[in-house]
Image: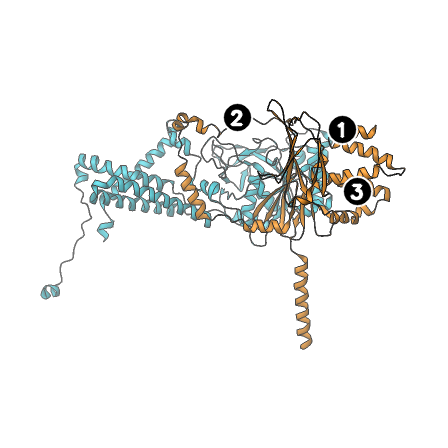
Chain colours: A cyan, B orange
Amino acid sequence: MINRIIQPHSIIITGLIFLFIWFLNLIRLNMHYIDPFNNGLKNYEITDIVYAYLAGQPVEEEGAFLPIVLVHTGEPDRLAIGQLVNKLGEAGAGAIGVDVFFDGRKDAHADSVLQQSLRQTPGVVLACELHDATRSYERFTEWVGVDTFFSNHARLGYVNFPANQTKVIRLFSPQELVGEETMPAFATALLQVYAPEKAEKLLQRKRPVEHIHFTRHRTDYIHHTQENLLHNLSLEEVRSIVQDKIVLVGYIPMEGAGDPLKDRHYTPLNQSYGNKAIPDMYGLAIHANVLTMVLNGHYIRELPKWLNWIILVVFCYLNVLLIHWVYDDFNEVFHGITRGLQIVEFILLFFLISLLFYKFRLKLDFGIGILALLLAYDIIMIYESLVRKRIPVIDRIPEEIPIRRKAPLPQQEEEE
Amino acid sequence: MRNIICFSVTAFILALSIRAAAQPAAFTVLYTNSLEGVTFSREGGNEQRIFAGVRLPLDGQLRLVDGTQARLLYENKKINLEGPGLYAMTDLKRKAEQEVSSGFLTRFWSFISNSIKDTDNAEQVEKYHRRYLTNARAGINGFAERNFAIGAPTYLSQALDHPDVVFRWDSTAHPQGYHFTITPRNGQEPVFTAVAREEQLSVRLDELLLDSSQVYVWKVTALQKDSTMLESNTYPFIYQPDMDAYLTGLKESHAYRQLAEEEQELYLLYQLEEDGYLHYAYRRYQELSTQDKPESGLYKKLFATFLARMDALEEAKSLVK
């Protein structure tokens, strides 16, 4: 049995496949401009399809209601935001996140009102931006985006998200070093005010970045305009909406209104998961998704890298064994069987990965496994028809590992 | 011991009945596009405005005037509503419960089968471009209102309560007569059609068996000699013959009771217009302005401004003259 599973040529082919993938990876690193496949797919993950097409309605924990309210500022006016923060504070908001940069000083009256409201209202988090990473990318030298006139009276949280040039936001970093001090992300800072134990749990995970579990569009949250809360609703009415909730204030117009590209970003919820789509989510909704994930404790789980690699290698090797066996025993119909096998396996694999992610939020990094599955057919062909025939040393390697058989026992001989 | 058991049973029954009477909130309002014109009322109770964040119980009804929208959440199912309309919460609950969200397997299969179907590549688009021409459009809708050849007063829209309504419209050439229709807003087949020689038509709404939770639209067209068609805008309305609950609620409201008698009438007129009971307000203005009372002059002026707001300028002018 063992000599059927451990076959030297299949091991060599598996090695070649991974070598080839490593070579493709080199191309990605150094010559991406001649690699259209990679260019098209570098912002794509299988789990994007789960987000965009397979996820159903967000499900609340039984009896719980999401304590997040989104407030659209329109063109942000400092005076109005100051008054709004005051009203929200009076109405008993649990935490207030203002996702608006207050860079420099503008109008003296408006600035004073805003500063005063920040002084009077505890639990306000202002947005800032991290700037200038050090050469080793271990820390940032400074934060920008808020004048000290305001930042001295409120907590700060940075609103940067790690993303490559395709700008698809999948990750957030809970905290970063700025100079010698640790600065929380915008969502982390809000959690530190609203639910310190949840923030602590998040930081205790000690992950430099967390995958964001996107579950909601902006239409799934309670949504108000600044105008409504400030002028059209009484304090009592505002209290009924925001008391003991996290209020996120920023640019988040409802559908059909406002600028559809302002502070809007690509996320895995985008149904056009290739390139060249319209950004699908406002920054404020991304913060809301991060908060939802941490408040519900629905983090994305990942396998340890070593386990992931073991699964990949075993998967690739089993496929090589299977395809190699088809090549040896059913040579005439090899192409048809192998291609059919690949399609069926691909769909099953896709289903399994999607199901694991959907049900258990377990993210399997199986891109290399799928590539190995696709390459196995061609590499076996090349190996059998070219490599083995041209390199006699390889051809002399036996098909199976010879297993030494023990000498028959004397008793057995007697029996015979 | 017996007393303790009796007390416990009574307390349990009491707790159950309090719980049943309390009716836990079932709906959450996620969004409304306006703070005016979206109201909730329980049977016999006052209308209260609703806004995002409010939780609503199951007993009651929601009213949206024309142009308003609301999004509710019921057991993780979103319900989008558009005005004008009167929605019983129990109906909304039933609709939400009937809505079966597809399972993971169904969604997966749908994705795979669509992937097999949607395999169009760039060459196919080039070769059969007309098949794909309606998939994308570059341009936006203009912001101006369309001009209709036949105008009509807007007090004949939104909530119509009277069983016999005289629909009116502006005069235009009508060699074949005016063609008047009432159609469900989301339907194709008219529930009422008539040909009128004059610029008005009396319709018995109570004989049409209209559904009070359904929005209807009325429209007038006039075929011209050159076979072109002149038409009016479509005017949405709901037929809501029972105004008693609304009026009782309004008259019992704190704001109404605080006012002096003459102010109460003005408040009533204002609130009727705000809440979309335009035809009722129209009749009330008519009644007050023709009374033989000293204040009828004031009501006449108010009526004229109301008519001006209702796009009935000619009627307003004739009143002022």
Quadrant into which the C terminus of chain A falls: bottom left
In the shown orientation, is residue A12 left or right of residue A190?
Answer: left
Q: Are marks 3 and 1 on the same chain?
A: yes
- Where is A260 relative to B7, above or below? above
Residue position for label 1: B313
Residue A208, can we see it?
A: no
Q: Callout 1, which amino acid? A: Leu
Which badge, 1 or 2, is on the more N-terminal residue?
2
Q: Is residue A333 left or right of residue A103?
A: left
Q: Residue at x 53, y 39 (%)?
A: A176
Marks 3 and 2, the one that precedes in the sequence: 2
Alpha carbon distance from label 1 to label 2: 39 Å
**Chain designation of label 3:** B
Q: Which residue is mark 3?
A: B268
Q: Which residue is mark 2?
A: B138
Q: Which of the two marks, 3 or 2, is nearer to us in this view? A: 3
Residue B100 image position (x, y, % from top left): 51, 49
Query: Label 3, label 2: how many angstroms apart (C-alpha)?
Result: 48 Å
Q: Are labels 1 and 2 assigned to the same chain?
A: yes
Q: Quadrant of residue A333?
A: top left
> Does label 3 or label 1 sit earlier along the sequence?
3
A203 vs B265, nearest the viewer: B265
Numbered mark located on residue A24 in the image:
none
Give the answer, above or below, for where B297 lies relative to B9.
above
Mark 3 burial class by Cα count in 10 Å: few <14, some 14-19, many 20+: some
Q: Nearer the viewer, residue B98 or B214?
A: B214
Q: Position of residue B271 (x, y in %)?
A: 76, 41
